[in-house]
Image (cartoon, helix red, strand yellow):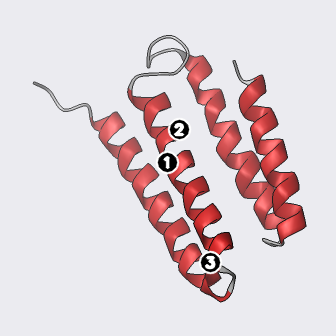
Amino acid sequence: MMVQWNEAIGYVVILLVAAGFYELWQWLKTRTGMYRIAFGVGLVGMLFLGWVSGAVGIIGSENNSVNLLYWAVFFVGLIGSVISRFKPRGMSYALFATALVQILVP
């Protein structure tokens, strides 16, 4: 069995990004418990979305380039969160935009 280094590096990057967001979550400890839970659920969801789209593919096989569009979901959520400065009302708009992009990808 041969190691596919491009996939291994990709998964390491995904895990490092998730760890970075975990550190951000630790910074958010000054927020309410429900806010931290919602942040954690979103983080796990994005981790699984990236992992599944890279490992087995959501649309067709993992070699289908359309699966790369699912990374737009992650970036819309990230950019929306930063623009809203993690305020609840802005985060609700960012989550709506993220869900809309995820619906539009297929």
Given contact means CB atoms under 8 Å apart, are the residues at marks 2 and 1 in contact?
Answer: yes
19 is higher (above) or lower (below) than 104: below
Tell whether 85 sits left or right of 73. right
Toward the viewer: 69 or 32? 32
Alpha carbon of mark 2 to alpha carbon of mark 1: how far?
Answer: 6 Å
- Frontmost of labels 1 and 3 is 3
Amino acid type for the residue under numbered disc 2: Leu
Residue beneath the point at 59% across and 28% down: 68
Q: Earlier in the sequence, mark 3 or mark 2?
A: 3
Residue indicated by mark 1: 47
Amino acid type for the residue under numbered disc 1: Leu
Alpha carbon of mark 1 to alpha carbon of mark 3: how far?
Answer: 21 Å
Amino acid type for the residue under numbered disc 3: Gly
Q: x, y percentage for residue 102?
A: 71, 32
Residue 84 visible within the image? no
Residue indicated by mark 2: 49
Crowdedness of circle 2 by 10 Å Cα count: few (<14), some, many (20+)?
A: some
